[in-house]
Amino acid sequence: MKTRMLMLGLSSCALMIATSQAQGFAMNSATPMPVLQEPQAPPAQTPPAQTSPDQSTMTTPQDQAKTTTFTGTIVKDGENYVLRDSSGGIYKLDDSSRAQTFEGKTVKVTGKLDADSKMIKVDSIQALAS
C-alpha cells in the first residue's frame, strides 16, 4: 500500500508539472518585473535676453508686410486719389498727392498693403502703356 501511495503521489506531481509546462509556465523562470523610472525633467531652456525695446528694433505690422505690386487705375475719391483694381476694389494710397499726375491712367503701384485699412504704403507709381 505504501508503494501504491508513493506511485500516486509521484504521478500527481508529474501530472502537475506536465500541465504547467503545457500551459507555458516554466518552473524555474522568474517573471520579469517592470522597471520603474523616475520622470525626467525637460532640458532647461535659457530665457531670452531681456532688453528694453528701442525704436530702431521695433517693427509695426505695416513694416512686416511684403512689398507687392498692384495694378489698376488712379481715380479721385473725394479729396484723395485711390487705386481701383480690375475687380473694382478700392485701395487708399498713403501719399495721395503722388498719384495726382496719374489720374485716369492705368498704373503699377509698388508698396506694402495694410489689409485692415486697405491702404497701400506707396514705394513707387509707374504709368503702364495702354
Image (spheres, rainbow, N blue to C red):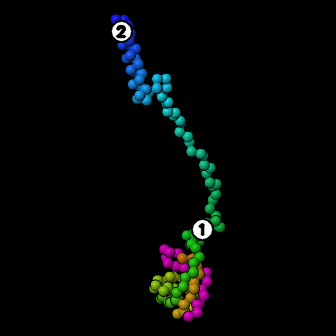
Picture quarter containing residue 98?
Answer: bottom right
| Label 1 Cα neighbours within 10 Å, binned few <14 / some 14-19 / many ≥20 | few
Q: Earlier in the sequence, mark 2 or mark 1?
A: 2
Residue interval drawn in magenta: 114-130
Residue 31, given in percent of the width and then of the height, sits at 48, 28
Q: Secondary structure at mark 1?
A: loop
Mark 2, mark 1: which one is toward the viewer?
Answer: 2
Residue 80, given in percent of the width and then of the height, sits at 51, 87
Q: Residue at x 49, y 78 (%)?
A: 118
In the image, taking residue 26 as reference, residue 70 lies left or right, namely right
**Residue 52 visible somewhere in the drawing:** yes
Q: Residue at x 49, y 26 (%)?
A: 30
Residue 47, given in percent of the width and then of the height, sits at 61, 51
Locate the C terminus and report the quarter of the image it occupies: bottom right
**Residue 121 visible somewhere in the drawing:** no
Locate the N terminus and report the quarter of the image it occupies: top left
Q: Is residue 124 magenta?
A: yes
The kind of residue tagged 1 is Thr
Q: Nearer the viewer, residue 13 or 36?
A: 13
**What residue did someone put label 1 on?**
59
| Label 2 Cα neighbours within 10 Å, binned few <14 / some 14-19 / many ≥20 | few
**What residue did someone put label 2 on?**
4
Q: CA distance from mark 2 to mark 1?
A: 100 Å
Residue 122, given in percent of the width and then of the height, sits at 58, 81
Q: Residue at x 38, y 20 (%)?
A: 15
- Give the number of callouts: 2
Q: Is residue 116 magenta?
A: yes
Q: Residue at x 54, y 85 (%)?
A: 71
In the image, taking residue 67 as reference, residue 4 lies left or right, namely left
Q: Nearer the viewer, residue 33 or 20?
A: 20
Q: Nearer the viewer, residue 29 or 119?
A: 29
The kind of residue tagged 2 is Arg
